[in-house]
Image (cartoon, helix red, strand yellow):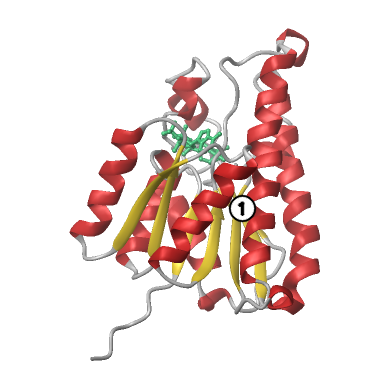
Amino acid sequence: MNSAVVNSVVVTGGSRGIGAAVCRLLGARGYGVVVNYASDVDAARSVVADVRAVGGQAVAVQGDVSAERDVTRMFDAATELGPLTGLVGNAGITGDRLARLDEQSVETVRRVLDVNVTGAFLCAREAVRRMSTRYGGSGGSIVMVSSTAAGRGSPGEWVHYAASKAAVESLTWGLAQEVAGEGIRVNAVAPGTVETDLHAAAGAPDRPQRVAATIPLGRAGQPEEIAEGIAWLLSPAASFVVGAVLPISGGR
Ligand code: NAP
């Protein structure tokens, strides 16, 4: 019998928000999906159930993207689903409140940089070690999740977070050039304001509605609208796209 090979993808922060929408979309399109999460096991299991309900394959894997051993474990789980062909580096945090830089604590800044920047580095490195032809791999695609905050700087809200996303974009561009000749395309999306729990985590659950007035399209985005861009960059349909940062932001 001829059973189709399932290509696997690691989606960090796949339990909620944008990551969950990415997992559901990729699962429906036939990828085997590693749904990584930090602590919300129920949310991760619910995403896995959604993928399986449409005939896809998924597994939930707890792990902190800033912890080297956890990252290795996530990628090991992907190999069990099928040959690894992708990473969506989506996990990200902002800190627990909106405030000027001089009012933020060093603990918050360190944690945001650790998750958003060191986490992006560790996941991208692991993906390259497993997919690059330099290491005997068959190539693949990496999509990092930045933010339009990287370009705006986000004064009065989360300058440290904006700076972390600027680092993600430099990482994307530099790594893209390093591994393009080794079968791996590296790109990023930069979402604008999207309706997820991220804003409540920063103490501002109504932020998407407040920001909506400044968005040319007149509203915040939905996680599914970001997932479409990520899935495209990840796929062979974007075969000549390397080192790009795609804004998906309603014009802001
Ligand atoms: P969210 O709803 O708060 O979800 C965050 C996800 O990341 C959850 O699955 C969470 O897991 C996971 N996570 C948090 N820390 C982690 C860690 N250390 N290791 C592994 N996973 C971790 O966030 P979101 O709005 O979907 O944001 C996703 C990405 O988009 C982030 O990189 C964010 O910066 C970016 N972004 C978001 C917006 C927006 O307006 N929402 C705009 C621009 C960019 P648990 O469920 O276990 O907590």
Residue 7 on image: x %, y %: 43, 72
Residue at point 75%, 16% (across, down): 101
> What is the residue that sits farthest to the bottom in this orientation?
1
Q: Is residue 136 above or below residue 228?
A: below
Residue located 71% across and 46% down the image: 168
Q: Which residue is mark 1?
A: 144
Amino acid type at image mark 1 = Met
The residue depicted at 54 percent of the width and 41 percent of the height is: 91
Point out the residue furthest to the top here: 103
Assess disc 1: are there few (<14), some (14-19) or many (≥20) residues with their C-alpha within 10 Å of its C-alpha. Answer: many
Image spot of residue 167 (x, y percent): 76, 43
Q: Is residue 13 left or right of residue 246?
A: left
Image quarter in which the N terminus is found = bottom left
Q: Quadrant of the C terminus?
A: top right
- The answer to whether one can see residue 160 in this image is yes
Left or right of 244? Residue 138 is: left
Q: Above or below — where is 11 with respect to 6?
A: above
Q: Against 4, is 32 above or below?
A: above
> Which residue is outermost to the left?
53
Q: Position of residue 186 (x, y in %)?
A: 67, 64
- Which residue is more in the foreground, 26 or 56? 56
Foreground: 95 or 44?
44
Q: Is residue 76 above or below residue 207?
A: below
